[in-house]
């Protein structure tokens, strides 16, 4: 029997405007490999958004190749990237970074899954000779894997450590729209354009079918970047289909409207769950929430909805993950809330 | 000024039926990473087509990752793949295979760009100790980069050499539909299913937006293959969009109808060019043709149409490449023919 | 001015018996690449020592290539090795393992720098799909980087976890002689032969000039191993010089006599330091000791002897490392002890 | 029964002077990892020899790691090296270069196994976009695998092509002494110092036990080179043993005296074989010669001496390889000559 899914934000296809943009390409002739007017136009829209007219912008078919190529192209053989132990590259990309020859310096116990300037400074310190890898890049995800977001002063402090140590700052923005539209966020797209050497705006998890916009500000990374994209298999023949998706995403602010919708749906559920007295594994203001629930309740709830049991918590409780997307039906959110309240009442009768 | 393009077969977007399949996904919830009903259904359609109910079928986002992952997943560190020196992996993938650690044994002077059983036997012979790579895979493209096709007895002879030497046979089918529907072809999809350890049916160059169907018959290669796809960045989050494209491609024989159209358009031009007395660099019965033309004529023709000047031929002549696709407008083909005839007359007045 | 060095155990050349074995090779003709009588003979001596007549034995020119090749040859692309965060491969090989494409799962806070069965079990648990690397090998160093040793029941417990999870157990024995001859040790060479899938007996840090003996028990790793050695640059042309070193090392128990001497020298210093009331960073019964000393005392001592200031400890104290070798002059050890006592008296007057 | 061997030039151990230098190290304390006085002194001797006071000099434990690290450290991920199809890196290093991610552009039919400026210019030409690897390095071996040598004007012409195309010139000098001392040679060590971006002077095949001297002139390659050596496993703990070998090799011209001896022994045999009417596969003035002999004669000769049957030649004849070394006994050469003459007489009676 079909159950409504809060499994992830890539369960549905493209937003209708994005899908229509793909339909419109059928009989239009374009140059291949991203040398087309859609990519050119979408790149300009990105540059406007982040206020970096000098940025190089590439459209990529997915998050893992974007992370892998960004890191591998930036680093020399003996250079490494620092990431939280919960980072996507560390635990959910099957060793893709290492497969290109580079070490990830994995850091345990990052607060809310976030690297801090102090952590980075500690990890960098004291490694200086040819027996160790050189710490050359900091990998951040905003929002993090657990839905938390970076604040401006945190990013600026990390930028400072990067500057002091000749390191690159890279932001994995698979769900970047969610961070920017989160309640309490004070980071702008322009800030990212100003602070990052390289970062990407994720499309696939926010209304695209498959497309990410990668932005390179640092000239050292810009050089020869297309060779890396091609060598690592992400130079898309019909690249215009990636550009066209981003034209649609960035038109009339659609990208941020969708992210805002995803956040609001998730936070609506979070509010009720919190009010009923449940705790959360992480405080997330974005489209992923991580309530801690009693196991029998999880079991019964999973008869009605699809979601992940995310992590063990105690003998009696587990953490679950609920995710909303651009396509989440608000009526289903309300339905979920009613069902949840009923379950709560039953278990607390 | 806009000129009609015979540059390549990935200039246009998806066939309308394929595009519609993508539109239909917008509000449908599916599992991610190819664990969905569209991939399952399309995989079954592929298995039926090649008469291999036991085959593993994966849907990939592009040709280069398909080649790279297929080869890297099949080979141990010290094993190599044999390819013609004109093979795509050897000259047009920026060292993607070597970037995964594997040598390509490149063979010069393959007749019509095709490996033969004799060539393979010669290349394999006599290498046997730990100072040399082990020849473990044969890489064929059908049709080849120059549009020529393999005949059944050629494939069977190569299969035999592979069997004798414990080697894998891999067919890059980026334009496979064109080979199958070419005049004179005697190879069936079922033959490929029978002969190959691993091969792929290219979608991107024949009516898909971006999708290839990779087929694995050999159990040794099947094992753990999804790990390789993920590690190399080609496990698509919205994988259902790849499966849905192939459902549309394989429905009602659309895939082969499109390939047939591409071939016919190209051959219609070839026939006229040949009749006017021009030679071809390679005899191609498929959708790419390689006429040898006088340089001034090439120059003038390029004012009217877009195409590649492919290779130098002599002081006075060059080889050009003309490519037709599923979307090629037959009226434009006729127009080209008239223009070509007029140019011919002018230069032979 | 020359100062006696307790910097490391590779400061001096080869033991005279080993050096003489090299001299004896000058005019003797042998086959290259380890296909010679010295390698064959030394391999048999190793097999006898560990009671594994079925073992494959290779002689390698150094520790880093031995670790790198052992791990890279054992693992498939998506498989990883678990190591303590203080492991040599994690922090002192410049990303050599990752440069072959493999992730190291680094584990913080291992007691005495040792992996335990419980730790391994925890790290292995719950990772099971293609988004994560497969945990396939456990990397132990005996003695560890901090001089501590594994006890038999610890190794047997780890072996059990490996068996339960289809994992390989690898022991880096760069200083293995020191573990075997340490006071309190209950592990025999035969135990290692029985428990390890693959391990090595380090020569370079115990009287050889440059030579390690790598032992492979697991048939899955044995296969084609010479190809890996050659590809990774460690198949030595004059391999007989490696075999000859091990013939000399293993003759008349010289290897263990030297290790015992190294341990005794270090422990003689440790005993005095301890009796004078100083603490140690790690309890090491082998040839490396890590006393915690007041900074001014360290400063003054370093005017007389060479050694590493190993790690910060507090505002007033640091950890130093003192290492003895097969060549350490016992008279110098006594001199050091007298100098140390005098310094202690001065600072505690 | 023992037979005298002309198999290769690494059958014997070290020259007695080199062996004595190793013995002298036994009780001397030195810093590890090439930071010692022997390496420093030997490096200065190398700089004097090539008249490049600015060169960086590293001592490496073998030829394959030297080639691999030199190439991998010089190239970016998408850059390739051009080599003759008979080059050591192409056919006798088990894909070591590709294992670091780099393509070798292999060139067939090089005259006498030598790349020429024209060949390099042709191979470089016309590759310019991100679908192809960038040609960045030329790999020469002097003398070549077949014993032939490069003349000064040939090297200068290749240097010119490298300059025109922003490419590096690398010379594998595994047997460099043999080229320099060959009859007819006009290339000096100073010429190599002037022309090469990077090259090495091979010790292992000319009197060392295991040691090569790698010289880097180009600042772009110098940077961070020690990190590459360590990561690829060739930073030798007792590096002073490598430096000490080169001190002995370069003292009193020993290196070139040994090479001259090797050449003279081989050429003495070649002269007789030629005078008796036999042809050679390649004209080699160095210590490897490749006579073409009737198969029955090869068979009978191999009862008396060890050597390789190198390649098939015709139905009745094969090519054999005879190699002399620094240790070749001239009395054995004379014996071989007498035996060969007798065989010749028998087969031509």
Image (cartoon, coloured by chain):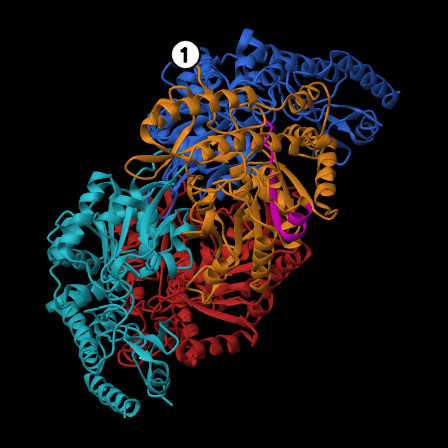
Chain colours: A blue, B orange, C red, D cyan
The residue at 66%/26% (across/down) is A281
In the structure shown, which secondary structural element does the residue marked by tag 1 occupy? loop
Residue C248: percent from left, percent from top: 38, 77
Residue A121: percent from left, percent from top: 40, 31
Pick whichever, B12 or C243, lies toward us: B12
Above or below D29: residue B215: above
Q: Is residue D156 toward the left or the right of residue B296 in the image?
A: left
Q: Which residue is mark 1?
A: A51
| The quadrant where residue D42 appears | bottom left
- Does residue D246 appear in this view? yes
| The quadrant where residue A260 appears | top right
Check the residue under mark 1 and report the chain it is in.
Answer: A
Point out the stretch of residues depicted in magenta.
B190-209
The quadrant in which the C terminus of chain A is found is: top right
Pick whichever, D191 or B254, lies toward us: B254
Pick whichever, C199 or D266, lies toward us: D266
Residue D278: percent from left, percent from top: 25, 78
The residue at 29%/40% (across/down) is D125
How would you rate the neighbour count of disc 1 (Cα within 10 Å): few for under 14, some for 14-19, many for 20 or more? some
Residue B196 among magenta residues: yes
Residue B116 among magenta residues: no
Q: Is residue A172 toward the left or the right of residue C62 in the image?
A: right
The quadrant in which the N terminus of chain A is found is: top right
Residue C334: percent from left, percent from top: 31, 65
- Does residue C348 appear in this view? no
Pick whichever, C117 or B48, lies toward us: B48
Could you tell me how many numbered marks the image carries? 1
- Point out the residue furthest to the top here: A252
């Amino acid at each position: 029997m079909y159950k409504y899914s809060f499994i992830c934000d890539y369960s549905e296809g493209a937003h209708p405007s994005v899908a229509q943009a793909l339909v419109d390409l059928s009989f239009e002739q374009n140059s291949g490999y991203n040398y087309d007017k859609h990519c050119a136009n979408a790149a300009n829209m990105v540059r406007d958004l982040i206020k970096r007219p000098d940025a190089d912008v590439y459209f990529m078919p997915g998050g893992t190749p974007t992370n892998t190529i960004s890191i591998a192209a930036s680093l020399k053989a003996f250079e490494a990237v620092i990431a939280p132990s919960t980072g996507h590259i560390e635990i959910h990309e099957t060793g893709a970074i290492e497969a290109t020859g580079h070490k990830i310096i994995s850091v345990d116990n990052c607060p809310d899954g976030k690297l801090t300037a102090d952590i980075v400074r500690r990890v960098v310190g004291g490694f200086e000779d040819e027996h160790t890898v050189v710490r050359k890049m900091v990998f951040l995800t905003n929002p993090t894997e657990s839905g938390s977001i970076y604040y401006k002063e945190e990013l600026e402090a990390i930028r400072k450590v990067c500057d002091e140590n000749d390191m690159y700052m890279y932001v994995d923005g698979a769900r970047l729209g969610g961070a920017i539209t989160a309640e309490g966020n004070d980071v702008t797209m322009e800030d990212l354009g100003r602070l990052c050497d390289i970062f990407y705006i994720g499309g696939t998890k926010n209304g695209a079918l498959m497309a990410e916009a990668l932005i390179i500000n640092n000239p050292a990374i810009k050089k020869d970047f297309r060779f890396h994209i091609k060598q690592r298999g992400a130079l898309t023949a019909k690249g215009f289909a990636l550009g066209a998706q981003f034209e649609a995403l960035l038109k009339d602010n659609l990208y941020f409207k969708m992210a805002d919708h995803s956040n609001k749906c998730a936070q609506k559920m979070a509010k009720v769950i919190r009010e009923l007295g449940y705790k959360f594994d992480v405080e997330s203001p974005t489209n992923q929430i991580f309530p801690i629930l009693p196991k029998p309740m999880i079991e019964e709830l999973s008869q009605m909805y699809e979601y992940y049991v995310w992590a063990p918590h105690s003998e009696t409780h587990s953490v679950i993950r609920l995710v909303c997307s651009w396509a989440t039906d608000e009526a289903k959110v309300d339905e979920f809330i009613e069902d949840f309240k009923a379950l709560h009442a039953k278990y607390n009768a």
